[in-house]
Image (cartoon, rainbow, N blue to C red):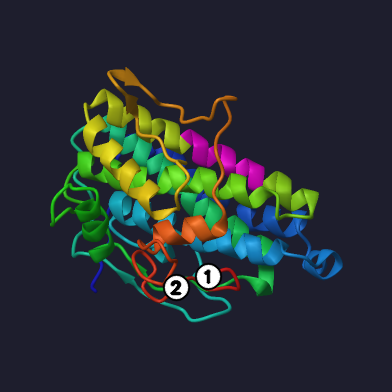
């Protein structure tokens, strides 16, 4: 697919864009200094597998936001995609840059895009030669299938307008929070655990922004339908919550103890593969790269 370079002139994004451009090397350097290449050999265990599982999910989120905000993929924003495993391309409509009508939402999206690209860079640097390549990612048929399962029609396009963009983002952000929380218990290295906690916190900030904005725009019914569809994929336990309960806001999805809930890697795979048995498909048509796939 031919990609047009987008001129990023919006002043609201200038600070983030500058930090993104100036901080690419810095972010990678921090990742390498915190996690020396010998760390995996010294610690062993599931840590590399878990971080690569997270990297696959970050590739997905980063590509979605990058195309929505900038009109191009993460490579044009300075992120690498090479690594272990089968590399893939991104399937997406022509001219995916969202035409935001609300300046605040455009700035939310730009900030989140910068964060997600930084997550990819950070995890790739932390993993070093063990990092997995970006797998094939579908940002077209997958959204149509997810929306159809939620009863939102047959031709959903998350890049068509800012409301659709927010609903598309809602699919990812809640899953990211639960995936990082569920994966935390699998990490042995406390440095890795602290870094993963930092990413989880950022994903929770993102999810809060998306949930609050959807609620303010009166999109509770559509968001709740997506929540129900996710819940139908991850097993019999009710782990998902929409953005309203009755007539009241439910912007912070928690259990009875006020804690965010967890998903196992298998439950996450069921959602991103868009089937309840975890067979490759959906957003990852050829599956994830790495040992957790």
Q: Earlier in the sequence, mark 2 or mark 1?
A: 2
Q: Main secondary structure of the magenta part?
A: helix
Q: Quadrant of residue 43?
A: bottom right
Q: Which residue is mark 1?
A: 293
Q: Position of residue 234 (x, y in %)?
A: 44, 53
Does the image show residue 33?
Answer: yes
Q: Secondary structure at mark 2?
A: loop
For the residues bearing labels 2 and 1, Cβ distance under 8 angstroms = yes
Q: Position of residue 276 (x, y in %)?
A: 40, 61
Q: Is residue 204 above or below residue 274?
A: above
Does the image show residue 9?
Answer: no
Residue 171 covered by magenta stretch = no
Q: Which residue is mark 2?
A: 287
Q: Position of residue 257 (x, y in %)?
A: 60, 25
Residue 197 covered by magenta stretch = yes
The boundaries of the magenta stretch are 196-205
Q: Secondary structure at mark 1?
A: loop
Q: Position of residue 247 (x, y in %)?
A: 27, 18
């Amino acid at each position: 697919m031919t990609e047009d370079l987008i001129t990023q002139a919006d002043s609201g994004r200038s600070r983030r864009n500058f930090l993104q451009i100036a901080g690419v090397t810095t972010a990678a350097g921090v990742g390498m200094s915190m996690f020396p290449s010998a760390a995996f050999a010294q610690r062993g265990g599931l840590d590399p597998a878990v971080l690569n599982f997270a990297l696959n999910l970050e590739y997905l989120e980063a590509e979605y936001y990058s195309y929505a905000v900038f009109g191009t993929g993460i490579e044009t924003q300075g992120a690498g995609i090479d690594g272990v495993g089968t590399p893939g391309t991104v399937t997406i409509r022509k001219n995916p840059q969202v035409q935001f009508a609300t300046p605040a939402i455009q700035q939310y999206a730009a900030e989140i895009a910068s964060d997600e690209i930084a997550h990819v860079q950070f995890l790739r640097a932390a993993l070093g030669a063990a990092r997995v390549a970006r797998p094939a990612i579908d940002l077209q048929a997958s959204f149509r299938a997810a929306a159809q399962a939620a009863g939102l029609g047959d031709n959903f396009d998350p890049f068509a307008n800012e409301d659709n963009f927010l609903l598309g983002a809602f699919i990812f952000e809640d899953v990211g929070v639960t995936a990082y929380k569920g994966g935390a218990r699998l990490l042995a290295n406390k440095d890795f655990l602290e870094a993963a906690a930092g990413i989880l916190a950022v994903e929770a900030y993102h999810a809060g922004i998306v949930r609050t904005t959807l609620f303010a725009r009166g999109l509770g019914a559509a968001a709740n339908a997506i929540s129900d569809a996710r819940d139908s994929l991850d097993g019999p336990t009710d782990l998902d919550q929409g953005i309203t309960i009755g007539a009241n806001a439910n912007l912070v999805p928690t259990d009875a103890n006020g804690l965010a809930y967890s998903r196992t890697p298998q439950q996450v795979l069921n959602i991103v593969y868009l089937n309840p048995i975890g067979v490759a498909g959906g957003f990852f048509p050829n599956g994830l790269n790495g040992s957790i796939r």
